[in-house]
Amino acid sequence: MRASLASSIAVACAAALALPVTLVAPATATARPAANALPPAQDELPGSTQSLPLRPLGASVRSFGDPGAAAREQGLGRRDVRPFSLVGVVWDDPAAELHGTVQVRTRATADGVWSAWQDVETHNEEHGADPESAEGAAGTLRGSTAPLWVGDSDGVEIRVRAEEGAPVGTAEGTTEGAAERVPEARTATAPLPAGLRLELVDPGEEPAAAPAPGTRAMAPPAVLTAAEAAASGVNSRLAPYGATVIPAAPRDDTVAAPVHETAAEPAAGEAAAAQTAAAPVREAAAKKPYIGPRPRIITRKGWGADEKIREKGFVYTKTIKAAFVHHSATGNNYTCGQVPSVLRGIYRYHVKSSGWRDFGYNFAVDKCGNIYEGRAGGVAKPVLGAHTLGFNTNSMGVAVLGTFTSSTPPAAAVTAVARLTAWKLGLHGIDPKGTQTLVSGGGNLYKKGRKVRFHTIAGHRDGFATDCPGGRLYNKLGTARASSAKYQGR
């Protein structure tokens, strides 16, 4: 179990609220399954993850004895596997970058048809916890690609190829501007990271259907586990225990819900610390009348989060000054009815495959405009996420599910981002059309400690050399800012 997350901005909820995360030790070459073997699931929790070590690929059998082959190209030939719906690739060193291409094709369970080759977004290192935070320094972290949603599948083939002329080293910028970079002195064919493994995620069974928009939240179940009570209790001023939906409200009159309203007894001193974390919300809301109507939010219970796999307790930052918008890079081949499964797949990939403490983003938005609670800790509270490397402190992360490099995001998704930010930023007295200064935690375009000014609603690319949230979604952020301000009544 990774080290305890205790810091000046970290507040644990209760000692017995959830079970610790148990991560599976990396597979080794000696554990490589035979061709077409069905690897066992990693654990007995709802859902499962198959982890398959990659092997060198080449034109002849001699390539398997070539030490350079593993550095240039790795993969797996077509094989039968247990059912899965989401794929990704991980490797041993979270600081190592994968300079190259990752492509997979999968066999649909329903008709046995193999898909065309699909690209997996390789640059996922810009997501994650800040380098010197307790989560960022955890020894269980791994490097990882973005996950890709492929739907119900039972066969897979993968190839990972190193990029020719990839940068061997990087240089951190020192001049003003979001694009500050120093060209690398030399380039070469960078070797692939060590310990490459294909992760095949089965998100598990569907939860009970969430109520339709405008209907009342479901009544809570008779019994909640301690972990479920903790995750639900931090929202209990907004919805009943065990609710699958936090209903929309014209004006949120519970802007500072107590953290401890659970069946579990809070540990000594934790309640006071949690109230301290919530105090800036009260003060800002009292001084600033511009708080947008609260949007309907589907809770973690609503999308079926398994509260046992996340790390226990909640971690807070001081306030929320800015919102970073992302795309999940999981592809656009999902229906809105499949979103709970997509979220459970991403959640499991973040925790069990990448080694994070919980779901990385604070919120998610689907193509139909539905809003989902992400990282646990309370939708009205300043929960510390792992979404924008180096700028997680005093910010929130919103992931629009899909890939928007060349696809235009649906208007419903952009509207949902505007509604969510109008409410959440409003709780902290923040103007969506303004700018805010954040301090870099390092690991990004800016040196640690550098003060950087962002749009209040910014794109991930504003703080890191990444395409995220995709050019088409990034171009819609101006619309989101203007709409968000209108929802606040500005």
Image (spheres, rainbow, N blue to C red):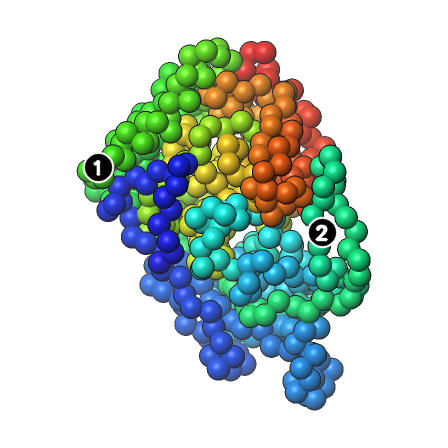
Give neighbour class at mark 2: few <14, some 14-19, many 20+ (Cα, 10 Å).
few
414 up-or-down from 107: above or below: above
Specify the amino acid type for callout 1: Ala
Q: Are marks 1 and 2 in contact (CB under 8 Å)?
A: no
Q: Residue 237, located in which quarter of the rendered image?
A: top left
Q: How many angstroms separate mark 1 from mark 2 (CA)?
A: 46 Å
Residue under the point 58% across and 31% down: 438
Helix, strand or loop status at disc 1 = loop
Q: Is residue 223 visible?
A: yes
Using the image, tell me which numbered label, if any, was put on residue 171.
2
Q: Where's residue 291, x and y in %?
A: 49, 16
Quadrant where the C terminus is found in the figure: top right
Specify the amino acid type for callout 2: Ala
Give neighbour class at mark 1: few <14, some 14-19, many 20+ (Cα, 10 Å).
few
Quadrant where the N terminus is found in the figure: bottom left
Q: Where's residue 186, x and y in %?
A: 80, 61
Helix, strand or loop status at disc 2 = loop
122 up-or-down from 216: above or below: below
46 up-or-down from 224: above or below: below
Is 207 on the left or on the right of 394, as rendered?
left
Q: Nearer the viewer, mark 1 or mark 2?
A: 2
Q: Which residue is labeled 1 in the image?
A: 268
Disc tally is 2
Q: Where's residue 112, x and y in %?
A: 57, 67
Residue under the point 56% across and 11% down: 489
Residue under the point 72% across and 44% down: 173
Which residue is at the front of the view, 56 or 206?
Answer: 56
Q: Residue 447, located in which quarter of the rendered image?
A: top right
Q: Where's residue 175, x and y in %?
A: 74, 38
Residue under the point 74% across and 82% down: 59
Q: Is residue 414 visible?
A: no
